[in-house]
Image (spheres, grey):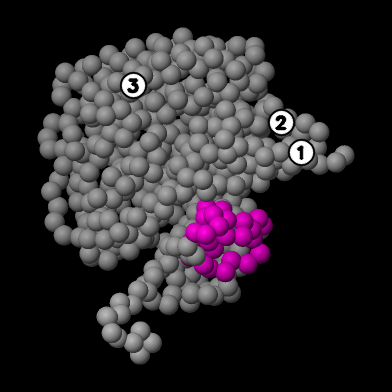
Amino acid sequence: MIENVKEITVQELLGEVQKLHYDGYRLVTATCVDNNNDTLDIYYHFDMDYKLTNLKLTIPKGTAVPSISKIFFCALLVENEIKELFGVNIENLVVDFGGHLLLSDGAPDNPMLRQQITIVKKGEDKNA
Amino acid sequence: MPKTVIPFGPQHPVLPEPLHLKLVMEDEKVVEAVPAIGYVHRGLEKLTELKEFTQNVFVVERICGICSCMHAQAYCQGIETLMDIQVPDRARYLRVIWAELHRIHSHLLWLGLLADAFGFESLFMQAWRDREKIMDIMEETAGSRVIISVNTIGGTRRDISPELLTKTKVVIDDVKQDIQRLEPVFLNDYTVKHRLVGVGVLSEKDARRLGTVGPMARASGIVTDFRTTGYAAYGELEVEPIVMTDGDSYARTVVRIKEVYQSIDLIRQAIDKLPAGEIAAPFKGFPTGEVISRVEQPRGEVLYYLRANGTKNLERMRVRTPTFANIPALLKILPGSELANVPILILTIDPCISCTER
């Protein structure tokens, strides 16, 4: 139901973002979603005259993604948040909080990722 | 000149909520500011995946007290789009009335805090005294003062009686007179102008580049106000963005004062046009699909991204609050400022840290 979604690859990301920056779009935010499998969706939402344009990146978990914060400085907070909460390896951030933007020492790693919980019945070998 | 690092916050007399800034200083001048947040992160986005989509209305209201009503409104609008629910006309107007009451109380709260920040205690108390009238009318119409819990999926949970609507009009007229008395002090007083005029200038170009929203963007000359897109009943009311061009702390104050008058006018319009009828539409089933819902909060545009899979739980709910969008602008206006002006500059973005961290 989201209009104006363009699916892109990691390699195309910076070029597409640069183009939108050149055209005068405002970066609204980015959204990361765990697809409940081995992939994540990252949406980059841009606004022009109240209309959203969305870039959609679908990546396997653990994939490195270049930061767009050198094009849109205002991406630094949301990219740090995605890195911290979803464990996405976002490279070349203008300010890297090192996983401590929102979370403190001792907090669970990547708490927004869906956790795989295996229930082992009593007496069963959990490694079987 | 040697540089020193001064930690500002997280506990500071001027901050109602915890925000930490590492200020790199050369003598009395700020040369760099690095924010550190995370003191009130509650993981509410994660919680919404665990609660039922109907229960999430109460969760999102608790993202922030000051704009709780609009958080719920944005969330409900998103779910209503996903489930194709037609909100009754009366509910759309009621949402405007309560949202604008919230905007008035938020702006009056901010004006009081600003006065407190530049040491004008009596002005601070008068702004908050006037705000009490709005809080009281919210309690009378909604049952509580801050988290008023009026929005529900499909409409509103409460109606406002004709007697209370009349009383609301009397109260907002009263508040309008109060603001007219305070306005000259905020805008013409020598010492107040000295603290605000030319302080923390954000150009239109920078405001656009940094993704600034709300009064912060409008004070820098950007014509933006999501209410003009016509969500709820705004499309049937007269609303124009209030824009200034100077981009300084004074312009941000002017914008917010004028927006109080604008909200009073919108409430009056909404009450006059309030149609009769139901206040909520029934619905069945569960939401499916993805949607983005946006609403203009007192601090600016809030964005909700929702992904639902046809079950009672959402797969994902993401909130981008206005303060989250305005922090980069704060980092832009701090360098070059005097240390004594830092509290004013932080306040002029009207920071809501509870919103920012969720």
Cα gap from disc 3 to disc 1, whole angstroms: 41 Å
Question: On screen, B173 above or below B311?
Answer: above
**Quadrant of the image containing the C terminus of chain A:** bottom left
Residue at 57% of width from left, 28% of height from top?
A: B14
Residue type at mark 1 is: Met
Question: On screen, B240 above or below A10?
Answer: above
Q: Residues within 10 Å of mark 2 (few under 14, many from 20)?
A: some
Chain letter behind tag 3? B
Q: B196 or B245, which lies in front?
A: B196
Query: Closer to us: mark 3 or mark 2?
Result: 2
Q: Quadrant of residue B309?
A: bottom left
Q: Quadrant of residue B297?
A: top left
Residue bearing the label numbered 1: B25
Q: Are marks 1 and 2 on the same chain?
A: yes
Residue bearing the label numbered 3: B134
The magenta region covers: A83-107
Query: Closer to us: mark 3 or mark 1?
Result: 1
Q: Which mark is residue B339?
A: 2
Say whether disc 1 or disc 2 marks the residue closer to the N-terminus.
1
Question: On screen, B170 above or below A123?
Answer: above
Cα gap from disc 1 to disc 2, whole angstroms: 8 Å
Q: Are marks 3 and 2 on the same chain?
A: yes
The residue positioned farthest toward the bottom in the image shown: A128
Say whether disc 3 or disc 2 marks the residue closer to the N-terminus.
3
Q: Are marks 1 and 2 in contact (CB under 8 Å)?
A: yes
Q: Residues within 10 Å of mark 1 (few under 14, many from 20)?
A: many
Q: Main secondary structure of the magenta part?
A: loop
Say whether disc 3 or disc 1 marks the residue closer to the N-terminus.
1
Residue at 48% of width from left, 77% of height from top?
A: A60
